Image (cartoon, rainbow, N blue to C red):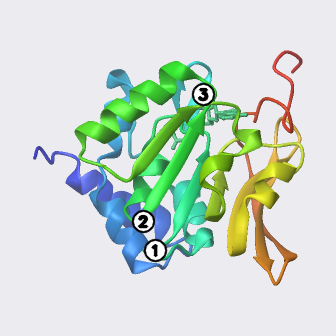
Amino acid sequence: MDDQYALARENMIRTQLIPRGIRDPELLQVMRAIPRERFVPALLKKMAYTDGALAIGEGQTISQPYIVALMTEALALKDTDKALEIGTGSGYQAAVLAKLCESVYTVDRIKKLLERAEQILTKLGYTNIHFKVSNGTLGWREHAPYDAIIVTAGAPYIPDPLIEQLAEGGRLVIPVGNRIGQELIKITKKDGNLFEDDLGAVRFVNLIGEYGWNETSS
Ligand code: SAH
């Protein structure tokens, strides 16, 4: 395997993740191994490990490495867990999840992005990720309940279907706020009750659709 990016990956772990408090050794190991450069457009490969989000086409972005790590760590995945991701985008977040749990169901409303992500992840040998083009604010009912749900686009509020599809003991991480900025919220379902934690300010592209923003206005 060509690993001209190994040093960049190690630097990302050392300068972006560890100093900001990411501790889970398994997660760090997974992010040390996944070739993030494969998930960004060819012209941006050299920037794949920079400390920020990058454009991936269709007006969408691949999240900053630290945010991927923060959200993943908050999900506290077990290797027997089933996870749902809303907003496949580049597929990078799905790759991280798939190394830490049993299966990942990921949906995106943009077919072109979903197909590209599926192609890359298949090439990289993943067999535990399932893909669908759809409005993810409705979840993916056939495979519910999920032990973990991650929404990688900013929502005006938490979509009801996602709460319903969260398993007992499950964790949901979602940016909630306005179109420009959001708070990263973690919901835990325990004995049928919901517990909420605020993980800090973030900035995501908009979650579009029923239970999200409408497409047009900005
Ligand atoms: N997790 C991605 C980043 C996603 S960017 C990664 O690792 O690269 C946000 C994505 O959410 C975009 O691809 C956008 O198309 C998608 N999206 C926005 N609203 C959506 C909805 N209602 N259902 C599914 N996907 C949605």
Report the amino acid beneath label 2.
Glu
Of residues 193 and 35, the one drawn nearer to the viewer in this rendering? 193
Rendering quarter of residue 140: top right
Residue 80 is labelled as 1
Q: Mark 2 packing: few (<14 Cα in 10 Å), some, or many (20+)?
A: some
Q: Name the residue that disc number 3 marks.
A: 60
Q: Is mark 3 within 8 Å of ligand 1?
A: yes
Ligand 1 under 8 Å from disc 1 Cβ: no
Q: Which residue is at the front of the view, 6 or 190?
A: 190
How many other residues sit within 10 Å of disc 3, few (<14), some (14-19) or many (≥20)?
A: some
Q: Residue at x 65, y 57 (%)?
A: 144
| Alpha carbons under labels 1 and 3: distance apart | 31 Å
- In the current view of this chain or complex, which residue is farthest to the front? 142
Q: CA distance from mark 3 to mark 2?
A: 27 Å
Pointer 3 or 2: first along the chain = 3
Looking at the rendered structure, which numbered label has been put on residue 102? 2
Snapshot quadrant of residue 212: top right
